[in-house]
Image (cartoon, helix red, strand yellow):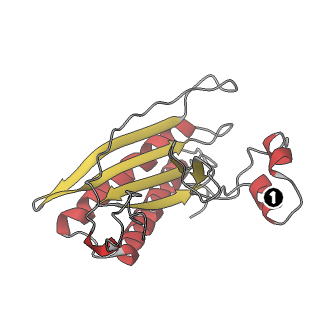
Amino acid sequence: AKYCIACGTPLRPGAKEAAHVPPPLILDLAARTDVGMARGMNEDTIYTGAYSNADGPIGTLLIVADGMGGHTAGDRASQLAVATVKQNLRRALETGVPADDAQWHALLRKVAAEANQSVYAEARDAGARGMGTTLTVAIVTDRRVHLAHVGDSRAYLINAAGVLSDGSTWNQLTTDHSLVARLVDIGQLTPEEARVHPQRNMIYRSLGTDP
């Protein structure tokens, strides 16, 4: 191999890939939201932070939730979803860390479903039927990233040195649960047409709108 499959470091001629130890992954975190041009209230909620338990560091948690515009209490929906994910994920990790990818995915699926139940219950109790939020969760542990995703708030992998074989510097990791994304998938729209489609903000999957 000429390059390490894990980190891209050039290898010495004849060196075995397995003998190369990738450098430790160092994360620099930044977070920012913007109210945008269409709304008077910022309905986004974000979180970044490290997770640990009694045995030591586990990983870094990143969350973004976008309350559904045009519905009642979208800001409350996004806040509740993020708080529920943080609380339930922390509680689960205190009892043990998932041993493999399948266990991580099962855990993230579980906490996302619990966040859905929290938002749905509050919407019914507060008489705010229809309030909801998108949710995208990434937890970075060791050299892996595990994702949970509902709606159209995207996760990207971006690297100025390139991330795909064609030289692209960014790669969209999530698929939008939206009408236009589905129409692009089945060939009814081009990506360029989807960007200006009048129903481009219509999503068919979100937290809190369905039990």
State whether residue 58 is above or below residue 37: below
Q: Amino acid at mark 1?
A: Val
Circle 1 is placed at which residue position?
Answer: 184
* Rendered location of residue 109, percent (x, y): 45, 68
Q: Place residue 69 in its image quadrant.
A: top right
Tell me if residue 132 can be seen.
no
* Rendered location of residue 146, percent (x, y): 42, 62
Quadrant placement of the N terminus: bottom left
- Most extreme residue toward the left, as rendered? 54
Observer-nearest of 88 and 20: 20
Tell me if residue 180 can be seen.
yes
Quadrant placement of the C terminus: bottom right
The number of callouts visible is 1
Q: Place residue 108 in its image quadrant.
A: bottom left
Crowd around label 1: few <14 · some 14–19 · many ≥20 (10 Å):
some
Q: Residue at x 86, y 63 (%)?
A: 187
- Most extreme residue toward the front, as rendered? 13
Side of 103 relative to 209 (left or right) = left
Q: Secondary structure at mark 1?
A: helix
Q: Place residue 102 in its image quadrant.
A: bottom left
* Rendered location of residue 6, percent (x, y): 38, 64
* Rendered location of residue 96, percent (x, y): 20, 70
Observer-nearest of 28 and 108: 28
State whether residue 99 is above or below residue 4: below
- Most extreme residue toward the right, as rendered? 188
Q: Residue at x 35, y 38 (%)?
A: 29
Q: Residue at x 35, y 56 (%)?
A: 140
Side of 96 relative to 188 (left or right) = left
